[in-house]
Image (cartoon, coloured by chain):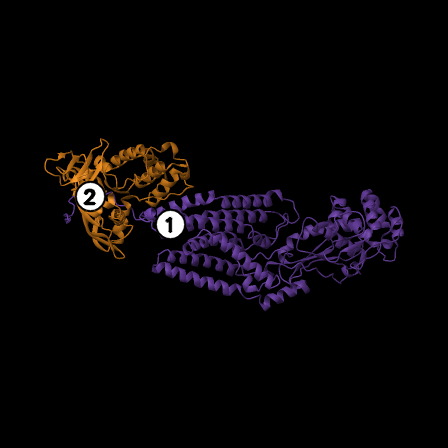
Amino acid sequence: MSTTVKPPPDEVTRPPAPTRDRPWAAVLALARFEARELLLHVPVFVFLALYLAYSVYRLVVAEGDDRTDYPVLHDVDRGTQAAPQLVALAVLLCVNVAVLRSRRHGTERHFGVLPVRPWRRLLAHVLSVVPFAVLVALVVAAEFVWAAAKPGAVGRGSLAELAVGPLIVLLAGVFGVLLACLIRSAFAAPMFVVGLYVLFAMVAAASDGSAPHWLTWLSPVVPESGGHPLPSDLLGRPAAWHALYLAGLTVTLLGAALLVSGRRTRPVAVVTAVALAATAVGIAGQSPDGSPRLTRARTVASVTPEQQQTCTVRAGVTYCAFPEWSGRTADWAAVVDRVRHLAGDPKVQLTVRQRVEARYGIASQAAIAPLTGPGQVSVGTWWGGNRVPEFAVGVASVLVAGSEEEASGICDARAVTVLWLALAAQPDPAGAFARIRLDDSTVGPGLVLAPTEPVAVSAEETRMVRELLDRPREDVTAAVRAGWAELTSPKTSLTRVARLLGVREPKEEDDRACTS
Amino acid sequence: MTVTVSATGLTLRYGGTRALDDVSLTLGTGVTGLLGPNGAGKTTLLRVLATAVPADRGSFTVLGHDPGSAAGRQELRRRLGYLPQNPGFHPDFSAFEFVDYVAILKEMTDRGARHREVRRVLEAVDLSDVRGRRMKRLSGGMRQRVALAAALVGDPGFLVLDEPTVGLDPEQRVRFRELIAQAGEGRTVLLSTHQTEDVAMLCQRVVVLAGGRVRFEGTPAELTARAAGRVWSSAERDPGARAGWRTGTGMFRNVGDPPEGADLLEPTLEDGYLLTLGDGEREAVA
């Protein structure tokens, strides 16, 4: 049948014209919808709940733990980076599934003719990740503010370090979206995650656990944890460059996703190119493995810290600290005063000096060598928990032996006096004794930790210390003061020490495991 | 008739096949049935009018909007309700969420107003009671009604329904007819179907498509009238009939050019449809 062309309609039903901002409002509405759907995905819900529970645990339940009362803020900022990786992983997998949803369930044919274009739907998927990044940012901020508000807090945090947690969630989300654009299979994202894990494991294995600096910093998170805190200007972490790298990479991947989805416009291409350039700049900035200046500064801090420290005198004792720790000298002084008082304020000119070993990097736990000068006591950068009685051991060792170098060789009955001086004034002397021994017990021979070298004690000395701690402190204090000259002599036998302090004499003279 | 949809010379090739061949038609307010055998080009025509695929040649306007330009296409889509053949669904969405999702894709951004609209269309398709149920837990008929609700949400001026009653049991089909009839009040509905009785009962106008070309455009009564005097009854199948089948009475119903003195029967729309098609196309229907 031949068809006829009808004249144009005389009257056409015209709904009201839409407002111009409607497409963007629809993108935001869709992003809200997708964010809610994302939250209902089991992996996202579970990992987010775990992350929040872990954060609350760290904030509330772990309160009073070793270092939480005396946080070092430029370590705390870095400590916020690891946990959000769980959320990021879940977001990557689930946003990928969400983008593929229409294709998997055959709704693309329908949705393809609806006003919100595919690239805007893609953008909504990316925006749906933003609430999760914001939530992580809030948790990170809460963790940091909580730590910073503590009276014992020292140092200063870095905004760039704090930004890493939220940024990796965003990056993971955008990557999940891009992956769905490139490979239209729900298996791609899990396979990618497994592949990435294998790749990092291989790199770590090939480089014997210490990958090249530039390669390490390509990883979204570089925690470098476990070492003793260093002054913030010795960290040498290219945190700002890394944040730029992550932000640039996120926008680059977003631009790539839009381009792949058909939004090949000039603004998108320009933004993608700029983001790519920013990523490259970030990589270039973070790649150099430390500057000579930093190496020099770390050496100075490790070998001649006095060049970087400020000193104050309290009750005749000089306290030298790196500038960020200057507020902590009062805590050290309280310990020193207690130990000196128990010892009868011997005429030893004490200098407490804060020490770090920065030459091997910020993740290193290298031991601090004993100071050689008379009356010099080392103190580390951690404080709180066991660090307090350990410092007391260091102070008592120097009071008894004269110097840290001499004290490191204590392999005689002086150990009894040192330990009683260090522990007697602790709130829980027996508990503290167990905690600062390597074997966590108060029987048998063992090693007692101190800021530099540990003190070796025999089983009989351990027993004597225990007995002394059980006795009235005033009685022992009087005995220590009266017998100070003999108690601090390396020639005094353990039997003589027992008689001087009024405890049961040893059956055998010595069974210590001296290290020197 | 107030013309709301006007197409001129629509042509579309898939490889060497002309899926649409110079199709011109006009639609007005109310339900228009699109009849045709398998492969006639019905779904292709609907996809072109829904802007899912562009025609190689020809043009059309819907509610005054020309999809030839990006802006016009966008405006058309804002006024379109589309129920594709075998519509997909998101199994983990509830019925409410699915329609809400489609409503957002139709740029309904005010959450309160959108949710009211979603509730309205779900009520219109009689699914209020199960709106919180996951799609994977709904029956096929319910899912089809959710898909219709998704097409209706936002009160589109042009509703394109591609074989919406396929796979439904008779009761569900009757329910669907009611819904489509309601939908046709005040808007333009183009309903593709194999079911001539649906067209007879629902449509104010009918278009017959075969071989990618429009073979008839008019009212159901006009299509039925084509068979006036060309349907007759006989004890055996008349060899001269274009089509013939034994009915429940045991007699044959023949369609074609009757012999003289034949026992003429009252024609139906299906008879008119069969006579409109060519021989090969009738076999495709059969």
- Quarter holding residue B102: top left
Question: In the current view of this chain or complex, which residue is farthest to the bottom?
Answer: A292
Q: Is residue B101 left or right of residue A456?
A: left
Residue B201 visible to the viewer: yes
Looking at the image, which is closer to me, B63 or B211?
B211
Chain A, which colour? Answer: purple
State yes or no: discs 1 and 2 in contact (Cβ < 8 Å): no
Q: Is residue A483 left or right of residue B86?
A: right
> On the image, numbered disc 2 is attached to which residue?
B207
Q: Residues within 10 Å of mark 2 (few under 14, many from 20)?
A: many
Looking at the image, which is closer to me, A335 or B77?
B77
Residue B62 visible to the viewer: no
Chain ID for label 1? A
> On the image, numbered disc 1 is attached to which residue?
A121
Quadrant for the C terminus of chain A, please. bottom right
Give the chain coloured orange.
B
Q: Residues within 10 Å of mark 1 (few under 14, many from 20)?
A: many
Query: Whole-percent x and y of residue A438?
Result: 74, 52
Q: CA distance from mark 1 to mark 2?
A: 36 Å
Q: Under tag 2, what secondary structure?
A: strand
Query: Whole-percent x and y of residue A363?
Result: 62, 58
Chain ID for label 2? B
* Residue type, mark 1 in image: Arg
Q: Under tag 1, what secondary structure?
A: helix
Query: Whole-percent x and y of residue B184?
Result: 24, 37
- Quarter holding residue A201: bottom right
Q: Is residue A209 left or right of residue A88?
A: right
* Residue type, mark 2 in image: Val
